Image (cartoon, rainbow, N blue to C red):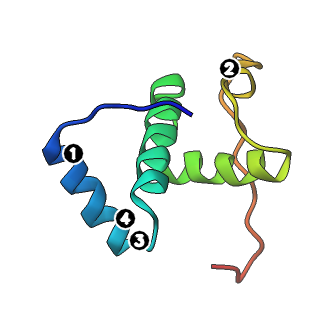
Amino acid sequence: MGIVKISDRMHENLRVAASALSRSINAQAEHWMRIGMLSELYPDLDHRQICQWLVRTELAGGLDVATAVGSGTSPAPISVAQGAR
């Protein structure tokens, strides 16, 4: 585990978002970093598609950079069961 220095303003943004979404500040920061990393790697995907891919990847054992860039192509969308929300 490492230490990442961020501005006071970003820390406050993290605190507010973490509280609103029932996450720790560290979990919120990690979530934003994960979404940002995938947004840069796959600029053609929207937030919904990235979240679907994260769920699928978690079910397959978790995310690492090698997994994210391994195929060189955008992750395929997952299908959602009808009626599920």
| Numbered disc 4: secondary structure | helix
Mark 4 highlights which residue?
18
Between residues 77 and 23, which one lies in front from this camera angle?
A: 23
The residue that appears at 67% across and 46% down in the rendered structure is 53
Mark 1 highlights which residue?
10
Q: Amino acid at mark 3?
A: Leu
Q: Is the C-beta separation of discs 4 and 3 under 8 Å?
A: yes
Q: Is residue 2 left or right of residue 79?
A: left
Q: Amino acid at mark 4?
A: Ala
Mark 3 highlights which residue?
21
| Numbered disc 2: secondary structure | helix
Dot 4 or dot 1: first in sequence order is: 1
Mark 2 highlights which residue?
69
The residue that appears at 82% across and 53% down in the rendered structure is 59
Q: Is the C-beta separation of discs 2 and 1 under 8 Å?
A: no
Dot 4 or dot 2: first in sequence order is: 4
Q: Nearer the viewer, mark 2 or mark 1?
A: 1
Separation (CA) of disc 4 from disc 2: 28 Å
Please state the horizontal and vertical placement of residue 48, each as a whole percent of the image: 52, 54
Q: Amino acid at mark 2?
A: Val
Dot 3 or dot 2: first in sequence order is: 3
List the single residue furthest toward the bottom: 83
Q: Amino acid at mark 1?
A: Met
Q: Callout 1: 10 Å neighbours few (<14), some, many (20+)?
A: few
Q: Nearer the viewer, mark 4 or mark 2?
A: 4
Q: Nearer the viewer, mark 1 or mark 3?
A: 1
